[in-house]
Image: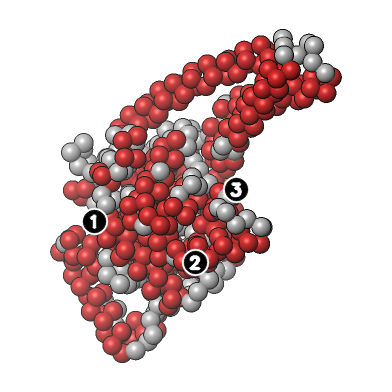
Amino acid sequence: MLSEDDLSDDFDEKHFPSSPDSSQFVTIESDGSESNVIERANQISLIEQALSSNDKSVLRQQCLTEHGLIMTSLRSQVWPILTGCMSDESGSEDGSCTGPSADSVPIQFLSPHRDESQVQKDVDRSYINYPEGLTTSQELALKERLKRLIVRMLREVPELNYYQGYHDVAAVATIIFEEDQEEVAFEFLYNVTLRYLRDHMLQDLDPTIKQLSVIPELLKKVDYGLWKLIGSAKPVYALSAVISLFAHEFNRFADLCLLWDAIFAERDPSLVLYVYVAAMVRYKDQISDDLDTLSMSEGETSSYPKEYIHAVLGRLISKNLNGVSAEKSHYEVSAIIRHALEIKRNQPLSRLRAMKSISKYSCLKNAKASTTILSLQCAEEEKLIRKRRRKEGRRKRRLVANSMNLTKRVNNLPLLLKVSVGVGLFTLLFTLTLDQRYSSSSSSFRNKLVGLSVESEKLARSFLHSVADGVRGLT
């Protein structure tokens, strides 16, 4: 157990030891007063007693206190328990997870995963904000561990599709767990991946988009006025926060750990959605002011364009949490978590219409860390993809047929109108080419061009309608 001197000396997230041992991280802030030191010491004693007796109820209660689990060395013991890496929460279909095989094949003998080239690119840009004070050799060592963790995860569960932002989640495991705890770190990442992130690692973005659709419906129930203000924008503004469990959003490790304490204590992947809604509600006045400012500067006064809404919400976390003092951000995160838990109690997912379109295998409905559930979910998603492609094929054929019929009617039109029709047909063909090109590369589609072909198609369809109206007017 740490002494009070240990607490007062190490009560700082910014210190990083000269050795790779990260157990000296303390991930909360303190004003250094004697009462606060004693309070933390008592809380640490309570957590250690709960660890000794394997009292998960007490551990979860402590996760939801103002300062959560307080320090990294405690989280490295508690998080594996709460995420199902230990004993009775790992196992069969009637348990919570299957867990990685104890006799897993060494990583070098597993087949390479199709996404490993992207993994290396993301690993190279990791550890930007934390831990602070890393030497070059320490950073290189962490990046090597990070790459091993992610590559092993993908090779052991090849059904998963890597996405940009997953490395932010895995990086936390390399900080929480020491170098000689790499097996525990992998088990932790394995369970977090299959329990909380599974929906985002399927063949396309559709399951993630369906998850995000929960956010505006929740917001409408919690704050109708704010929903009217920003509800016209699709909730892709929350994409990076949701798929990284806010690891991509927070600049302070302390804030992220406090949030993860709550997420793992609740054992509910949906909490991250409630947290985003709670954050929007907490900063709704600022959202409104920023939209007003942006609209006036651009001469917009009647309504807020969707791109303005996305721009404002895109910097919601950075402006309100990353841009303030550590003490202030800790207070804000604690308040957001409390409100999120309150919303979750009052507005359970079971009451939301958006849940009807979400798969029964989704982690929102079945949070087991099971590769069997993952396989069923992948098979279901593949059927849906084939169905969408057939529907899309029929739609494209109709568009082509309509465009060909249109060309038969332009022979006697003025030259200028013929040129306009030609431009419209070119736009349509270009749209179809884009659709074909990017439907063949799901990873590129997920990461780079969501919605591009849809917007192009809308443009082409609108153009053809307008030309058709002109043709009817002339004939």
Q: Which residue is mark 1?
A: 345
Asked if residue 223 shows in the view, the reply is yes
Q: Are marks 3 and 1 in contact (CB under 8 Å)?
A: no
Residue 303 to residue 438: above or below: below
Mark identifier at residue 68: none
Residue 144 in the image, given as x and y percentages of width and height? 53, 53
Q: Which x, y percent locates residue 153?
A: 42, 43
Q: Amino acid at mark 3?
A: Lys
Q: Position of residue 174 (x, y in %)?
A: 44, 58
Mark 3 vs mark 1, foreground winner is: 1
Between label 2 and label 3, give the one nearer the viewer.
2
Residue, x 47% and y 55% (percent of image)? 229
Q: Is residue 84 above or below residue 159?
A: below
Type of the residue with mark 1 = Arg
Quadrant in which residue 384 is drawn: top left
Q: Which residue is mark 3?
A: 121
Q: Given the image, on which type of amino acid does mark 2 rest?
A: Gln
In the displayed orientation, state which residue is furthest to the bottom.
34
Residue 155 screen position, x and y as percent: 45, 37
| Placement of 325 over or under 245, stated as above or below | below
Residues packed near mark 3 inside 10 Å, few (<14), some (14 to 19) or many (20 plus): few
Any mark on residue 286, and which?
A: 2
